[in-house]
Amino acid sequence: MELALIIPHIEALIFASDKPLTAEEITELVNTAQAFIDDRTDLGQVNTAIEGIKEKYESEFYAFELKQSGGGWQFLTKPQYHKTVALLNGDKFLKKLSVSSLETLAIIAYKQPITKSEIESIRGVNCDYAVQKLLEKDLVVIAGRNEEAVGKPLIYATSKSFMDYFGINSPEELPKISEVIMEEFEKATVVSNIIVNANTQMDDAVAPGDEENNEVSQTAENPALENDGEKEKE
């Protein structure tokens, strides 16, 4: 089927969906909606149409764009308009994870699949509450049980909502821990250099002996100061 005919249908599906749609899902939905029999849309056509739509909304004219996130395609507001949209959504953008939940989520994301006891051995504290909150927010899912461990404990992994929330398509797209550490090290180095430079400038501004030199120059400019000094000595 001609791309020009299916593109509006694809745009409508992605726009109306409350979750990211994969190219396979879009293909099936388009064919079901149009009841195509002899002239069915195939996956290759849908992928080509998606690339065309993506390119279309890259224009500065649009405040949103087509992004592959959370394992599928969806329309997302462009970064430069996030603050504006935050004003509209209010409390949604103010609900943040606690430090303990963030730490727990980070451990699950990088160590998944992982059991609760393994998480606690890394954090050093009980994580029942943090895990429960992450499950409630649908950022973490129960991925099964560790059949080899005593008691066959539950194992946890990040969800599709987690990938959607962070704009990735798989855990493999998370930044490497070494890269994060290096980035923080570079930031710390920059701050350290700024402090060192500031201290150096302060030392240069008030170098040793400057006070004595200032007194000599002031005495030369004002002989009265020297005479007053002599009177005090007498």
Image: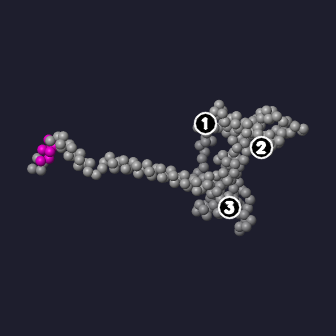
Q: Residue at x 54, y 52 (%)?
A: 183
Residue 154 higher or lower than 2, as above or below? below
* Observer able to see residue 16: no
Q: Earlier in the sequence, mark 1 or mark 2?
A: 2
Please, what is the dominant secondary structure of the magenta stretch? helix
Identify the residue position indicated by label 3 in the image: 115
Residue 124 lies in quadrant? bottom right
Relative to 201, is 138 on the left or the right?
right
Residue at image coords 69%, 41%: 67
Q: Residue furthest top?
A: 61
How packed mark 3 is, by other alpha carbons closer than 10 Å (few <14, some 14-19, many 20 or more), is: many
Is residue 204 found inside the magenta-colored segment of the image? no
Instruction: Residue 174: give its label.
Output: none
Q: Position of residue 28 (x, y in %)?
A: 82, 42
For badge 1, the amino acid type reads Tyr
Q: Is residue 121 visible?
A: yes
Q: Which of label 3 and label 2 is nearer to you?
A: 2
For the residues labelled 1 and 3, say whether their Cβ atoms are less than 8 Å apart: no
- Is 204 placed left or right of 179 in the picture? left
Q: Badges 3 and 2: C-beta atoms under 8 Å apart?
A: no
What is the x, y in percent for residue 126? 61, 61
How far from the left and from the top, in percent, is residue 169?
A: 69, 48
Looking at the rendered structure, which numbered label has been put on residue 23?
2
- In the picture of the structure, the residue carrying the numbered disc 1 is 81
Q: Nearer the viewer, residue 223 or 147?
A: 223
- Describe the element under mark 2 as helix, strand or loop: helix
Q: Are marks 1 and 2 in contact (CB under 8 Å)?
A: no
Point out the stretch of residues depicted in magenta: 224-230
